[in-house]
Image: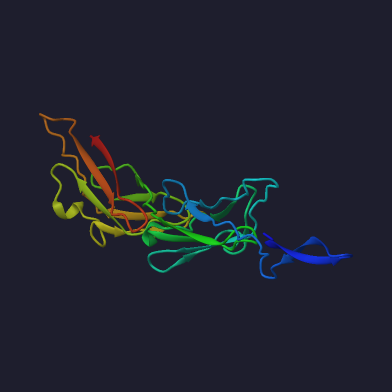
Amino acid sequence: MIRSRVRKIAIVAGAGAVATASVLALSPFSASAADPTPTTVVVTAPATITTGHAVTFTAAVSPFKTTSAPVVKAGGTVSFTITGSDASTVSCTGGNSALLLNGKGKAVCKVATGGLLASASPYTVSAIYTGDPNFSGNSGVLSQTVSRATTHVKLTFDAKPVSGATTTFTATVTGGSGSMPTGTVLFSASSPGAQAAKLKCNPGGNSQPLAANSASVPVAQATCVLAANWFKVPAPTKTSPHPSNSWSVWASYSGDGNFGVSVASNQGSSKV
């Protein structure tokens, strides 16, 4: 705003007649530019994020435009920083810095599959807005929890258990995306009349480690070999000419920092 004051000056004209004129006096320090509009930055994400899944973080600058004509929209850029509780860092797919605001005053950071893990949760997501000549810079922070992925165990055998034979059981653990479950699988077997020692995985006992198999797309598996005679059908008798017996095997996955626990079972019977 330009401030002024009027000063009257007396002017002598002719025979003593006095006239006045108004003179504009300018203050040399009165002109100033308008201050930038203050802003806030809010960082948002999906309500639920599971380990290994892709996710998009959004930084919203408010206000992002002027309220009076001519309408001016906020410019400038946003830089994201994503840090896990273990001090690990995660990058946006297009880079973390100088992400342009869109027409609605928002900038997005897309994290690829496998980028966020429950084992590093919670994450601190920071977004810094640079501002421009019309809108002031600011920053926002979000604390983001990442949950463990649900798992599924599939329990299979190399051949249908028959009386007196060795049987190999395989537990395949799947869940989430972008990473593979780790940890152990606890096997448990039962069959009426069986010796306890025969119902233990050999070698190594009933707790078996998960490892990637040799498939083109590896999956996590654990195996349990039950020795000969772990399952037996009694010999026929006059009173029981066609005896039978049953068996059951369970596989319990212990879970890890990124994947939850799960259990599977398989049962069967055989007769002679």
Work out whether residue 128 can be spotted. Answer: no
Taking depth in this image into account, of 143 and 116 the one nearest to the observer is 143
Q: Is residue 66 above or below residue 128?
A: above
Residue drawn at point x = 37 percent, y = 52 percent: 147
Question: Is 245 on the left or on the right of 77, as rendered?
Answer: left
Residue 247 in percent (x, y) is at: 22, 41
What residue occupies the far front of the structure in this picture? Answer: 15
Question: Is 109 on the left or on the right of 200, as rendered?
Answer: right
The quarter of the displayed image where residue 120 is located: bottom left
Taking depth in this image into account, of 48 and 163 the one nearest to the observer is 48
Count the labels in the image: 0
- Colouring scheme, one of rainbow, by chain, secondary structure, one colour: rainbow
Residue 12 in percent (x, y) is at: 84, 67
What residue occupies the far right of the structure in this picture? Answer: 14
Taking depth in this image into account, of 223 and 114 the one nearest to the observer is 114
Q: Which quarter of the rendered picture does the N terminus lie within? A: bottom right
Taking depth in this image into account, of 26 and 125 the one nearest to the observer is 26
Q: Is residue 137 above or below residue 176?
A: below
Work out whether residue 197 can be spotted. Answer: yes
Q: Which quarter of the rendered picture does the C terminus lie within? A: top left
Question: Is 100 on the left or on the right of 237, as rendered?
Answer: right
Residue 186 in percent (x, y) is at: 25, 54
What residue occupies the far left of the structure in this picture? Answer: 239
Residue drawn at point x = 23 percent, y = 47 percent: 164
Residue 225 in percent (x, y) is at: 29, 54
